[in-house]
Amino acid sequence: MVRRVNLILRLEESSLSVPFIYYLSLGSNALPPLIGFYRRKELHAETRVMFVFMTISLCITMIGYILAELKISNLWLSNIFFLFEYAFLTWIISYWIHSKKIKMLVLLTIPLILCMWVLAKLLMKDFLKFDNYFSSIEKLFLIIIACYVLFQLHKSSETSLIRTVSLWILAGVLITCAGNLLIFALFNTFIYIPLEDFTKVYSLHWSSNILMNVCYSLGFLCLRRP
């Protein structure tokens, strides 16, 4: 039986040290909420939702960290977070879709993903096990939606998108989804490889998380008064 515990707990139990990039990734989660709070007077409808999302995400991250410190598996928390992440990010991205039909279609994927999530949990024999199938599907959906919206914004914009909130939020979504797709898809396979190699692979996740938070932070910095 596989010992399904947090990677950091496994590192602490071994002779390997916890990589510095892990702590950097953990700390970077606080950056978007802090900048969002600092720019709270400039928040628009979609960035208010984004601020709430990043704040809740930070809380979930801290809960996961505390569980790891208590030597309790936090993989089940990831299974819940993926659904929460998809619903919020899809809702935020929908603000930048001009076509009402496309926007409705994109928003309808939320209940679709919810049904898939419920089905996946019913088929799972152990809820504490990491759900690599659902996480992969969720990431693929977000990549498709983000790429479509980014292409449409570029096509319709007469000026550079570099100073727009939408560009940096979409860039963050694409970085975290594309960067983690393979890792999450093969997560339950990677846990069988030597811990040192697994740590190197998972460093890609920590790196993409840092870049994602930098992009989200730049998005908040691009805010203008409504």
Image (cartoon, rainbow, N blue to C red):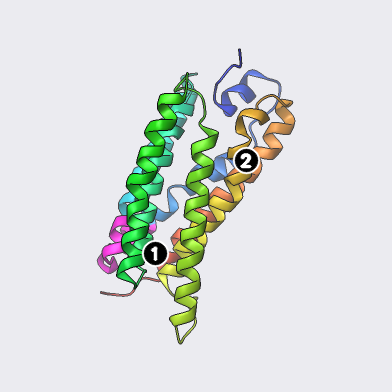
Mark in front: 2 vs 1? 2
Q: Which amino acid, mark 2?
A: Ile
Q: Which mark is residue 183?
A: 2
Magenta span: chief secondary structure: helix
Residue 201 in the figure: left or right of residue 90: right
Q: How many marks?
A: 2
Q: Quadrant of the C terminus?
A: bottom left
Q: Residue furthest top?
A: 1
Q: Position of residue 221 (x, y in %)?
A: 41, 67
Snapshot quadrant of residue 49: bottom left
Crowd class of label 1 (few under 14; some 14 to 19; many from 20; radius 10 Å): many
Q: CA distance from mark 2 to mark 1?
A: 28 Å
Which residue does the image show at 36% across and 65% down from the upper left? Answer: 102
Boundaries of the magenta span: 35-50
Q: Quadrant of the N terminus?
A: top right
Residue picked out by circle 1: 220
Question: Which residue occupies the foreground of this view, 10 or 17?
Answer: 10
Q: Secondary structure at mark 2?
A: helix
Q: Residue at x 60, y 44 (%)?
A: 205
Q: Can the viewer see residue 210 in this picture? A: no
28 up-or-down from 92: above or below: above
Mark 2 closeness class: few <14, some 14–19, many ≥20 residues within 10 Å: some
Residue 51, placed above or below residue 219: above
Question: Residue 4, image x and y in percent?
Answer: 56, 20
Residue lying at 64% horizontally and 45% vertically, measured from the top left: 204
Q: Nearer the viewer, residue 188 or 77?
A: 188
Question: Is 37 a magenta residue?
Answer: yes
Residue type of the residue flagged with mark 1: Phe
Q: Which mark is residue 90?
A: none
